[in-house]
C-alpha cells in the first residue's frame, strides 16, 4: 500500500505525521512525504522519500518574520490568525492541489494523509471516491468539530457547566467569532471556486475533519471537550512514537539522576523568538528551589540566545531526544504545543502552560479542564506565577491523579493498530467508476 503524507513545514505539523510514516514504513508500507524544502532533509533522514512544495508557496517556518516581514505588523489575535491562514494554509490551496496532482503521477498513492491545517488536499474531498485516493485527516492540534456546549473554537472559552453559559456561547460568542472569521471563510470559498469546486456550506475550520474518509485525532478522548455529535470517521490514536532521534545526549545527561525533581521548559520551535516570554522567567522562578534541575530545550536555537543569567541548577540544549527525556522528568513547563503536550501526558508528566499565540490558548484551556496541569492564562508569566504553580503541582495530588488516569488511557490505545485498520478500511472503499452509457 502506498501512502502519501502532506504537511505545512512546521515541526509541530510534520513530526506527528512523520512518526506515523516511519512506523508504517517499518511495517512494509510504501510511504512518501510532501512538504516545504526546508524540511526535506528531516523527512529523508527518517528514510522517507520526499516531494517539495512549489517555489511560489514554499517557505522556511523556522523564521516566519524573515519569510513574511509584514507578519510582525499584524497584532496578536484575529488579525494575526487571518494573516497566517491566508499566507500559510488557505491561500496556497490551489498551488498545492495542482502540485499534488503532479506528485500523484510519480507516486500513485492509495491514500493521502494530511495534517488538519494543510488545505492542499481539501479539493480532493469534493471529488467522487473513484476519482481520488482515500483521504485521511490527521489532528495535530485540538479537535475542531462542534463542541457540546456550543462554544466556538479559538477564544479558548472554558467548557460550559450551566445552561446560562451555554446560551451565551450559542447566542453571543458563536456568532461573534463567525463574523470575525468571515474573511477566511470567504477566501476558502474563493480558492475552491478557482478550482471549480462549490464549498457546499462547509466551513474552513472543520471541512478537513468532517469530510475526510477517516480522521486520526492524535490524543485520547479525555483530553478533548465533549462534542455535539461525535463524527463516526474520527479515530483517537493516542500518542504515536516519533522518529527515533540521532541527537547526541548532552555531557550532563547523568545529572538528572542526582535531583529529586526534574523540570523541562520549552517554547517549541515557532514561538521561541523571545526566550524572555517563558524560558527566562522559569529559570528565575526555580533558581532557588531545592533539589530541582531545570532543563531547557531551545527549539533549535543556540543556548546563547538566552540573554539572562543561567542558574547553577539549569541545563541548556538546542535539541534533546524526547523519548529519552520525558520518562525522566517530573514536570513540563511549556507554551502549549499540542504534540509536546500529548507526548508529556502519555509519559505521565503534569504540565504548567503559558501560551497566547496560534492554537496554544485552546490547548492550555484543555490542560486546565482535564485537570492535568495549570493554565497561567498568559504567554508571558512572571517568575512568581511560575513558582506558585510549580509548588501547587507538587503539593496537590489531584494533578498527579489526573495525569496518571490519562497516561493509563494512552496506554490502552494501540494507535498504530487503529491506524492500520483504518487504512485498510478506507482504501478498500474505493468505488468503481460508473459505467459509460452507450446510445
Image (cartoon, rainbow, N blue to C red):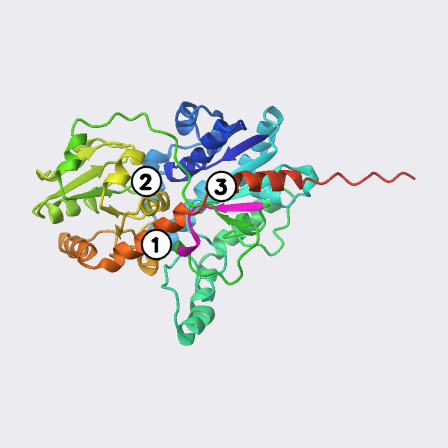
Locate residue 305: give its quadrant: top left
**Marks 3 and 1, how far apart in space?**
32 Å
What element does badge 1 sit on? Answer: helix
Classify mark 3: helix, strand or loop: loop
Mark positioned earlier in the residue sequence (3 or 2):
3
Are the two marked residues, 3 and 2, in contact with CB atoms closer than 8 angstroms?
Answer: no
Residue highlighted by disc 1 = 405
Q: Quadrant of the N terminus?
A: top right
Question: Residue at point 56% right, 41% down?
Answer: 421
Q: Nearer the viewer, residue 424 or 153?
A: 424
Q: Provide the residue span drawn in magenta.
A: 214-222
**Rendering coords of residue 297 (x, y %):** 24, 36
Q: Which mark is residue 302?
A: none
Cα distance in 3D space between marks 3 and 2: 17 Å
Examine the rendered structure and indicate whether residue 58 appears above or below residue 398. Answer: above
Picture quadrant where residue 310 is located: top left
Pair 3/1: label in front:
1
Q: For mark 3, what is the residue? A: 118
Q: In the drawing, does residue 234 fall left or right of residue 345?
A: right
Residue 43 spot, x, y in % from top left: 43, 27
Residue beneath label 2, please? 270
The image shows residue 248, relative to residue 401, as above or below, that is above
> Residue 365 location, x and y as percent?
34, 58
**Whether residue 353 is situated above or below residue 171 in the rendered picture:** above
Residue toward you, 100 or 266: 266
**Would residue 377 be seen by someone viewing this image from the given angle?**
no
Q: Residues within 10 Å of mark 1 (few under 14, many from 20)?
A: some
Amino acid at each position: 500500500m502506498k501512502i502519501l503524507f502532506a504537511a505545512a513545514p512546521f515541526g509541530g505539523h510534520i513530526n506527528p505525521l512523520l512518526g506515523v510514516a516511519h512506523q508504517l514504513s517499518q511495517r512494509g508500507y510504501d510511504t512518501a512525504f510532501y512538504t516545504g524544502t526546508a524540511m526535506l532533509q528531516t523527512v529523508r533522514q527518517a528514510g522517507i522519500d520526499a516531494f517539495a512544495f512549489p517555489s511560489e508557496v514554499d517557505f522556511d517556518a523556522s523564521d516566519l518574520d524573515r519569510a513574511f516581514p509584514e507578519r510582525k505588523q499584524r497584532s496578536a489575535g484575529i488579525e494575526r490568525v487571518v494573516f497566517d491562514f491566508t499566507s500559510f494554509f488557505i491561500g496556497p490551496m490551489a498551488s498545492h492541489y495542482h502540485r499534488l496532482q503532479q506528485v500523484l503521477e510519480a507516486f500513485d498513492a492509495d491514500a493521502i494523509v494530511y495534517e488538519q491545517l494543510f488545505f492542499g488536499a481539501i479539493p480532493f474531498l469534493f471529488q467522487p471516491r473513484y476519482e481520488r485516493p482515500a483521504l485521511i485527516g490527521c489532528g495535530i492540534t485540538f479537535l475542531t468539530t462542534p463542541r457540546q456546549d456550543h462554544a466556538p473554537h479559538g477564544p479558548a472559552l472554558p467548557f460550559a457547566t450551566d445552561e446560562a453559559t451555554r446560551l451565551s456561547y450559542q447566542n453571543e460568542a458563536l456568532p461573534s467569532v463567525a463574523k470575525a472569521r468571515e474573511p477566511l471563510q470567504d477566501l476558502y470559498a474563493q480558492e475552491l471556486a478557482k478550482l471549480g469546486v462549490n464549498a457546499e456550506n462547509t466551513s474552513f475550520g472543520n471541512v478537513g475533519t468532517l469530510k475526510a474518509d477517516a480522521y486520526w485525532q492524535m490524543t485520547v478522548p479525555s483530553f478533548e471537550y465533549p462534542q455535539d455529535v461525535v463524527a463516526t470517521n474520527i479515530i483517537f490514536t493516542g500518542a504515536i512514537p516519533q522518529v527515533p532521534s540521532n541527537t547526541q545526549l548532552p555531557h550532563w545527561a547523568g545529572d538528572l539522576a542526582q535531583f529529586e525533581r526534574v523540570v523541562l521548559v520549552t517554547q517549541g520551535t515557532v514561538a521561541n523568538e523571545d526566550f524572555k516570554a517563558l524560558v527566562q522567567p522559569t529559570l528565575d522562578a526555580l533558581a532557588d528551589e531545592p533539589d530541582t534541575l531545570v532543563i531547557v530545550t531551545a527549539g533549535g536555537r543556540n543556548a546563547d540566545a538566552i540573554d539572562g543569567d543561567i542558574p547553577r541548577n539549569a541545563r541548556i540544549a538546542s535539541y534533546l531526544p524526547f523519548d529519552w527525556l520525558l520518562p525522566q522528568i517530573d514536570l513540563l513547563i511549556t507554551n502549549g504545543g499540542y504534540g509536546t503536550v500529548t507526548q508529556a501526558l502519555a509519559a505521565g508528566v503534569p504540565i504548567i502552560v503559558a501560551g497566547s499565540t496560534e492554537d496554544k490558548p485552546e490547548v492550555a484551556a484543555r490542560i486546565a479542564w482535564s485537570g492535568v496541569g495549570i493554565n497561567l492564562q498568559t504567554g508571558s508569566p512572571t517568575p512568581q506565577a511560575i513558582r506558585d504553580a510549580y509548588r501547587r503541582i507538587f503539593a496537590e495530588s489531584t494533578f498527579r491523579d489526573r495525569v496518571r488516569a490519562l497516561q493509563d488511557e494512552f496506554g490502552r490505545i494501540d494507535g498504530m493498530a487503529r491506524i492500520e485498520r483504518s487504512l485498510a478500511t478506507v482504501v478498500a472503499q474505493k468505488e468503481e467508476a460508473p459505467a459509460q452509457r452507450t446510445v
